[in-house]
Image (tube, rainbow, N blue to C red):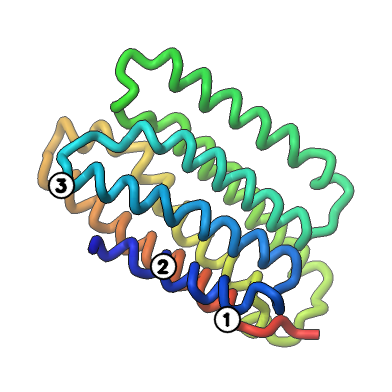
Amino acid sequence: MRLTLVPVLVAGIIGFIRYRHLPLNLRYLAGLVWFVLPIEILGLVLLILHRNNLFLMPIYMVGETALLGLVYRHTLQSRFFNRLMPWVVGGFALYAVADTLWAENLTRFRPGQQVLQAVLVLGFVGLYFRKLLNELQVPHPTREPMFWVSTGLFIYFLGYLQIALFSNYLLHYSRQLNHNIWAVHSLLYVVLHGCFSYALWLRPQK
């Protein structure tokens, strides 16, 4: 089993156990983990069979962005974000579909999609931290599940943004360096789903 699958599986199990006790925003987070898990398993199977699995990326990214949008919609409770979110997710989905269909090779890494997704998710996270700082209604942020969700997303997507921007260049420069960079990505992915697991396990402050 590939290491990155383990924290996704753990988060999925915790989400299943705690689902009935979760607020709506964290139920969408559990749904995100359950959406990611079969794609991760299929990607791993294709990797073992020495088949290219990059065609799964647009499906993964659009679904992930949409579900994260729902997580933050029910967290921020902002009319502006509620109106904006469907347009943002819909626009990103259209771009991902168009970029994929116009690609000469569907199994080639498409950094434009990754960069745009990273910017969008970092925007969601930025709005959350802005609300947290402005309202100051959470006396102990580390006991708040969405703090850990947002921290994990910030760490992961900030690192992933750099990887997406320079991955194709690094591949031409040094194949070994490119492998090392993607090993760092795997570590970031483990951290992300570790934060998800902890957030799903925590009881939100009242």
Question: At 72% from the left edge and 63% from the top edge, which residue is drawn?
Answer: 25
Q: Earlier in the sequence, mark 1 or mark 3?
A: 3
Q: Amino acid at mark 3?
A: Leu
Percent x, y of residue 1: 23, 63
Q: Residue 165's spot in the image, x, y percent?
A: 37, 37
Structural distance between the alpha carbons of marks 1 and 2? 14 Å
When asked about the image quadrant of residue 161, the answer is top left
Q: Is residue 163 left or right of residue 21?
A: left
Q: In the figure, is residue 168 to the left or right of 69?
A: left
Residue at label 3?
177
Residue at x 41% of width, y 48% of height:
39
The secondary structure type at the circle numbered 1 is helix
Q: Nearer the viewer, mark 1 or mark 2?
A: 2
Q: In the rendered image, which residue does mark 2 sit on?
A: 9
| Label placed on residue 201 | 1
Report the residue at 45% width, 64% height from top: 192
Residue 139: x percent and y percent? 75, 86
The amino acid pointed to by label 2 is Leu
Q: Position of residue 97 (x, y in %)?
A: 52, 23
Secondary element type, mark 2: helix
Between discs 1 and 2, the one toward the N terminus: 2
